[in-house]
Image (cartoon, rainbow, N blue to C red):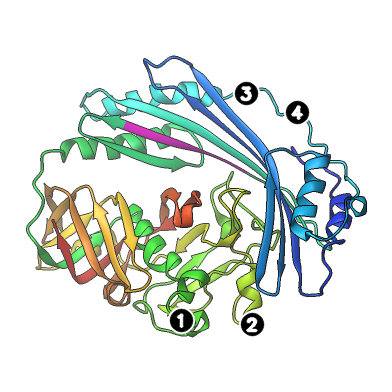
Amino acid sequence: MPFSKLDTAAVARTLSQIAEHPDDVVDAFFERREEVELAPEGDAGGLRAWREEGFAVRLVREGLTWMASRDAIEARPFAEALRQVARAISAASYPEPTLEVGPPDPVAAPELLDFPGLLSRAVRAHHVGFPLRVSVRRHRRWVQVVGPRLVAGAESESFYSCMVESSWGRYGTLLPRLSGGAAEEIAATTVALFRARQALPPAPFRGPVVLAPHTVAVLLHEAVAHALEADTLAQGGNPEAAVGVAMAAPCLDVLDDPSSAPEGVRRTTDDEGASAVRRWLLRGGIVEQPLADALWARTSPVFLPGAGRRGTRHLPPGPRSSHLEILPGEASEADLLAGAAEGLFLPEASRGALDPLTGEFALHLPYARRFRRGALAEVVGPCVLRGRVADLLTRVVAVGSQAKPAGAGWCAKGGQKLPVWATAPSLRLEDVEVAP
């Protein structure tokens, strides 16, 4: 581990010198990052690597936050950051703890070299051919959080991103690993987008829709997870007031559990060093436990810490989801498409957007398929599912019986780009609006 030689005890002792009041929050956040990219075919460079490391020191006192960050893990910059945060203690008061982290490993990512070939063969297996520009990256991150009285275990994350571009569009996703199954999943989506490239958008529609797991994950990330982050709730008033509110249909149970995320991105502590919580966001459609970090948890006995995340050491942590789980129901795929009314099947969502003040929600879809009498029919072009969150989630009438890994992607709330993950079944909603 990159932080195995870090003298965390000495760091903790040094931090204790600026924790003057019992309610002070003081911590140091150490971070190392590495990204390795395989340049797209035709570009020079082969494997290209970016590495960075640094730390942040934070002091929160009486509702005010002071933070200092540096792009190096060295004793002198650390002592300088402590003085910057504390502002009033002389240089002589701060010993410089040993911050030995060791050199990074040599760059080696053979799995990146093999993946474009896997993807190309998977596309050809669908009996189509078209030029693709494939970019694939490996993302690795190591984190160590130290407080004056608590030193959390070191955490690490490793995952991949893939972007496929063509003359008719682009598709990107995050992957916990590169494998033949991952290549087939990307190929199937890319081929479906290719075949739908000339489809016309549907006329304005109101009726039943069935959301595939990937679309469900985007919907619930925006309409449930973001809506139930304590800082988002506070924009509309008292965030505690959300607890106990019937927000969705009784058949909808949603959790956030970083410890059950895919292997490689699983976490037992958050970016503040607090234990990760298996948190029921919705149980039976009722709000049970909003997402909170340590500071929001201090404002109310209703909130639990453990959901503090930070996209970079240069910004403070905030409440964010990590791995959403939507519990499966009892409906088969045939049940979800059944009925006399014509509906729309929504396989993929390109993005979602929630206005936290009005509750208005929009889910953008690159294509869809009609269904009639239990069978999928013709493809239609780009469209948007719209509605108010409070109304939209109450229209869920059936939950699929099979939950699948779904919805991995980047979330950029507040300028902090973070990977998010989900496991979800399909959902059927009645009487919702879809527009071109």
**CA gap, disc 1 to disc 4?**
48 Å
* Residue 147, above or below 377: below
Describe the element under mark 3 as helix, strand or loop: loop
Q: Which residue is mark 4?
A: 103
Q: Is residue 251 above or below residue 142?
A: below
Quadrant for the N terminus, please: top right
Q: Secondary structure at mark 4?
A: loop
> Magenta part of the protein: which range?
157-164
Amino acid type at image mark 4: Pro
Residue 143 seen anywhere in this rendered image of the structure? no
Where disc 1 sits, the SS reads: loop
Residue placed most toward the observer, 415 or 222: 415
Q: Which of marks 3 and 2 precedes in the sequence?
A: 3
The crowd level at tag 2 (other Cα within 10 Å; few <14, some 14-19, many 20+) is few
Q: Amino acid at mark 3?
A: Val
Q: Which residue is mark 3?
A: 107
Residue carrying label 2 = 301
Tags 4 and 2 in contact by the CB under 8 Å rule?
no
- Specify few, some or many for label 1: CA neighbours under 10 Å numbering under 14, 14-19, or 20 or more: few
Give whichever of discs 1 and 3 has the lower sequence position: 3
Whether residue 416 is visible, yes or no, is yes
Report the residue marked by disc 1: 237
